[in-house]
Amino acid sequence: MMIPVRCFTCGTVIGEHWDEFKQRARDGNEDPGEVLDDLGIKRHCCRRMMVSHRDLVDVVAPYQ
């Protein structure tokens, strides 16, 4: 599914950073921790949401 707009724990807006994080950390060769630092995501709850998110849109789409 899509990344949540806000962190479930603290409510900080994190959805706006997803595309850049995905491009730099997952598709590129940068360290995810450094990318999150550059994006200004400091809280561990927000970092958890970014690192552990799995984009399942392509997996679920055939069943709709």
Image: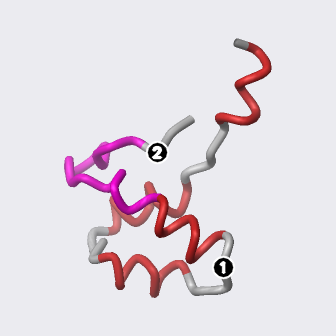
Q: How many marks?
A: 2
- Residues in magenta? 4-18
Q: Is residue 30 left or right of residue 42?
A: right
Q: The C terminus lies in which quarter of the figure?
A: top right
| Model colouring | secondary structure
Residue 24 located within the stretch drawn in magenta: no
- The first of marks 1 and 2 along the sequence is 2
Residue in the image at 28% along x and 45% along y: 6
Residue in the image at 65% along x and 34% along y: 57
Q: Identify the amino acid type marked 1.
A: Gly
Which of discs 1 and 2 lies nearer the camera? The answer is: 1
Instruction: Tell me the number on the disc at residue 3.
Output: 2
Instruction: Report x, y in % for residue 33.
Output: 47, 82
Task: Give the residue number, with chain letter if any, for mark 1.
Answer: 28
> Element type at marker 1?
loop
Instruction: Report x, y in % for residue 56.
Output: 66, 38
- In front of the other: 17 or 11: 17
Residue in the image at 66% along x and 79% along y: 28
- State the residue lying farthest toward the top: 64
Using a 10 Å C-alpha cutoff, classify the residue at mark 2 as few (fewer than 14 neighbours), some (14 to 19) or many (20 or more).
Answer: some
- In front of the other: 48 or 13: 13
